[in-house]
């Protein structure tokens, strides 16, 4: 079943993407929740025209996202955490913690746009997070998890 997404859907696609999903998922979840519409021939024509008109605005958005990404790569992030024996942390470092540290440094990013391999960090050391500013602009953010003194 082909659908046109009206909103970003995690692990599926972004707004105005043409996606193919199983019929049950489309009819029972995406369409009733207003996340997608059927991809009829007329809807595809409207989508093509919309994307054509939006291309100029999209270039500005990509430029702004790239500028933010450049700011982010210039940062040297250190996240402090309480530790137990050795290098194990009390609790864990998650995307919310990374988002909070970035906010303290003047870069506002929602935690849903940040992903850490493995989900959560439970030990001290150097790690990388993927930060998505735009569908075409994704940056690897290195950060260091250090022990609180």
Image (cartoon, rainbow, N blue to C red):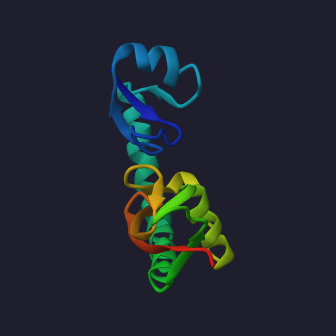
Which residue corresponds to the image point at 40% horizontal and 54% vertical from the top-left?
A: 52
Q: In x, y percent, where is residue 1? A: 33, 20
Quadrant including the C terminus: bottom right
Q: Nearer the viewer, residue 41 or 115?
A: 115
Q: Nearer the viewer, residue 96 or 110?
A: 96
Q: In x, y percent, where is residue 129? A: 42, 64
Q: Is residue 90 above or below residue 9?
A: below
Which residue corresponds to the image point at 41% horizontal and 13% vertical from the top-left?
A: 24
Q: In x, y percent, where is residue 58? A: 46, 63
The answer to whether one can see residue 110 in this image is no
Q: Is residue 80 above or below residue 25?
A: below
Q: Is residue 145 above or below residue 134?
A: below
The answer to whether one can see residue 116 in this image is yes
Which residue corresponds to the image point at 58% horizontal and 28% vertical from the top-left?
A: 34
Q: In x, y percent, where is residue 128? A: 39, 67
Question: Exactly how many numbered labels are in the figure?
Answer: 0
Q: Is residue 101 above or below residue 6?
A: below
Q: Nearer the viewer, residue 63 or 98?
A: 98
Quarter location, residue 3 = top left
């Amino acid at each position: 079943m082909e659908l046109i997404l009206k909103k970003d859907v995690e692990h599926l696609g972004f707004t105005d993407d043409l996606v193919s999903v199983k019929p049950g998922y489309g009819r029972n979840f995406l369409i009733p929740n207003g996340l997608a519409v059927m991809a009829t021939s007329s809807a595809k024509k409207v989508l093509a025209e919309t994307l054509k008109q939006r291309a100029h605005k999209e270039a500005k958005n990509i430029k702004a996202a790239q500028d933010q990404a450049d700011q982010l790569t210039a940062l040297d992030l250190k996240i402090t955490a309480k530790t137990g024996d050795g290098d194990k942390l009390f609790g864990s470092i998650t995307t919310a913690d990374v988002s909070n540290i970035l906010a303290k440094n003047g870069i506002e990013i929602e935690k849903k746009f940040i992903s850490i391999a493995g989900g959560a960090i439970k030990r001290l050391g150097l790690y990388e997070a993927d930060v998505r500013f735009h569908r075409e602009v994704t940056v690897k953010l290195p950060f260091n998890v250090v022990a609180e003194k």
